[in-house]
Image: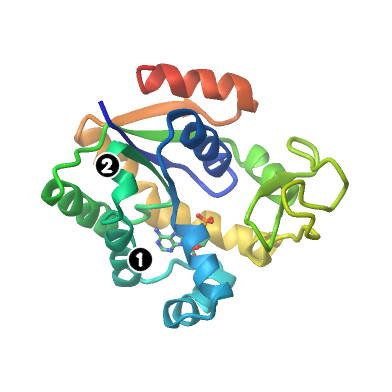
Amino acid sequence: MALRIVLLGPPGAGKGTHAKILSERHNIPHISTGDILRSQIQAQTPLGKKAKSFIDNGKLVPDDLVIEMVAHRLDLPDVKNGFILDGFPRTVEQAKALGEMLTSRKMPLSSVLEFDTSEDVIVSRISGRRACPNCGTNYHVENIPPKREGICDKCGTALIQRKDDKPETIRERLKVYHDQTEPLVQFYDGKKLLRIVNGNLEIAPLQKELALQIGL
Ligand code: AMP
């Protein structure tokens, strides 16, 4: 059965890290709307230009732009065996649009996994997070350090801290999460799709919990 998963949780909860692992293990695409938007910004596309100031200020990119972007992504052939959505949906409007897209493509969701994570853990994960501006690989100075400090293992590029990972922007992103994304917990609970995992766990035990929750 195709695995079609949504990962839900605040920034810094570990969604990206676990999405990458699950994607490699099950050979299904990791669809991160944040990654797609950042690559659009880097390529200076019209979408990237529209999205940049929202992202830099920790705000959500408008629903219509993100929904259209995801609809195109779900039309690519690699989603036929499943997918992991990371960072989408983030509003009830996006969740409703996703529901319609998946119904019309006859691709029902398997589950929505909520990463229940404490604020302390979030702050420590985000402040130590480093990213490769070239290939997008993520690191953490303590939890997932690169082999050579400050240098990407995969492509040798100097790592950076994401502009929106600065303390004042993190505060805004957490507020946006509570105000606009947290209502999705109830939304998906009502659809009997919600599973809660302990986002405070280290990578290996959390992978085990995720495997249990998705029935693998
Ligand atoms: P992320 O990498 O998931 O933390 O996303 C980084 C930023 O991209 C967010 O703070 C938003 O500005 C934007 N973004 C990513 N996904 C969405 C989405 N589903 N809806 C609106 N904005 C998004």
The tag on residue 4 is none
Foreground residue, 113 or 185?
Answer: 113
Task: Check disc 2 and give the amino acid type.
Answer: Lys
The furthest residue to the right: 149
Mark nearer the N terminus (1 vs 2):
1
Tell me if residue 169 comes above or below residue 194 in the rendering. below
Which residue is identified by label 1? 66
Pointer 2 local density, CA inside 10 Å: few below 14, some 14–19, many at least 20? some
Foreground residue, 190 or 100?
Answer: 100
Report x, y in % for residue 106.
14, 43
Side (left or right) of 210 relative to 43: left
Classify mark 1 as within 8 Å of ligand 1 or not, answering yes or no. Answer: yes
Report x, y in % for residue 127.
73, 51
Q: Secondary structure at mark 1?
A: helix
* Spatial CA span between label 1 and label 2: 21 Å
Task: Check disc 1 and give the amino acid type.
Answer: Val
**Residue at (39, 17) in percent of width and height:** 216
Q: Secondary structure at mark 2?
A: helix
Which residue is identified by label 2? 80
